[in-house]
Image (tube, rainbow, N blue to C red):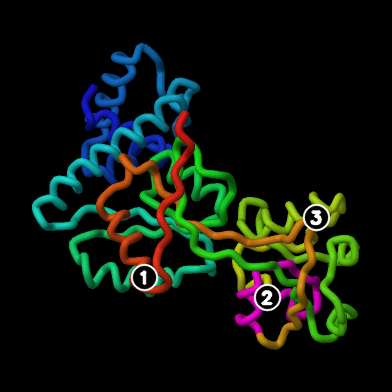
Amino acid sequence: MELRHLQHFVAVAEDQHFTRAAERLMVSQSGLSASIRTLERELRAPLFVRTTRRVTLTEAGRALLGEAERILTQVRSAHEAVAAVQGVLRGTLALGTEQCIAGVHVAGLLAAFRRRHPDVEVRLRQTGSVALAEGVAAGRLDLAFAYRTEPDGDQLRSVALASEPMTVLCHPGHRFATAAAPLTPREVSDEVFVDFHPDWGPRRTTDAAFAAAGVRRTVALEVNDVHSLLDLVDENLGIAVVPRHFRHKRPSLTALPFDGAGGTRYETVALLPLEQSTGPAARALIALLGTTGAPAPAPRRPPSS
C-alpha cells in the first residue's frame, strides 16, 4: 500500500467527486481512478459507490477513512519532526476552534505564532466542540480550542484554558431584568430561548444544567454564531444562557447570574492527540499559549491501564 494511494483515497472521500479531487491533487482523472482501483484490489473491497453526480463511501471505505487520515497525519508529523530537529519548524498546523472561546485570544495567538514560525502554514476551522474533538481524534486537526465534552481518554488529552459560570442574558425590558437573586433552570424554563446548535460548548453546558435539574426547555431560535444570538436577545425575541464573558460583547443587555444544579461551569480546553502523536507545530503553539497569557497547565494524561 503506497502513501499516494491513501492520499488519493482521502481526497476523493472529502470531495465526493473524482474530477474535483484530481484538480486539487493536480493529477489526471484517469491516474486518480487507477490509483483508487489499485487500492481496492489490494484491500479486496470496493471503497466507493460511483454515480454520475458524485461518489460516496462504502462501509469498507468508511472503515478505511479514519485509519488513512491517521496514517497521513503521522507521516506529516514525522517530516515535521525531522525538520524541527534541524532547527526549522515548517509544514502545516491545522487548528480548530469554537467562536469566542474563553481563555485564549485565537487571532492574537496565531499572529504571535506566525511571527515566530513563518514557514508553517496555518489552517483554521471554526465549528462546534463535538466536531472539533472528532477532528483531533481522527487526525484531521492538530489541536483545537473547545469546550470540554468528555474526560481525557485513549485518543485525546487536554490542557485547561478557562472555567467560568453561566449567565442569563435578556433585554433590559424583560421581566427578569430586575431579578434580585440568581435565576434557576425551573424559573426560566417556560421562556423562549435563543441558543446555539447542539454540538456547541455553551449549548451543551446549558442542556446539561437543565437535565441535571430535571427541567425541560425549548430552544425556539437556534443560531450558529455569537452575534446573531446577541441580536435576537437584543430585540427581546428570547433569553439566552451563555458563558459569563459573553456579557461584555453587548453591554446593552442585562446579565443575571444563573444558578444551575450542582454549580454549572463552562470549561474550555485545548484538545491535543496523545503525546506521541502531537506534531512539533502543535507543541510550539501550546508552548506559546503559556507565554501570551497565564502559564499553560501541564496536559492531563489518560489513566494508565
Query: Which residue: 54% across, 60% down?
Result: 268
Question: Which region of the structure is painted magenta?
Answer: 230-250
- Say which of 81 and 297 sits in front: 297
Of tags 1 and 2, which is closer to the observer?
1
- What residue is shown with label 3? 210
Kindly state the secondary structure of the residue where label 1 is placed: helix
**Label 1 to label 3, Cα distance in Å?**
34 Å
Q: Position of residue 145 (x, y in %)?
A: 47, 58
Of tags 3 and 2, which is closer to the observer?
3
**Relative to residue 44, is residue 49 depicted above or below?**
below
**Label 3 to label 2, Cα distance in Å?**
21 Å
Q: Position of residue 56 (x, y in %)?
A: 47, 31
- Say which of 145 and 218 sits in front: 145
Return the mark for residue 109: 1
Return the mark for residue 234: none
Q: Badge 2: how crowded within 10 Å, few (<14), some, or many (20+)?
A: many
- Pointers 1 and 3 in contact (C-beta within 8 Å): no
- What residue is shown with label 2? 230
- Say which of 37 and 200 sits in front: 200
Residue found farthest to the left: 86
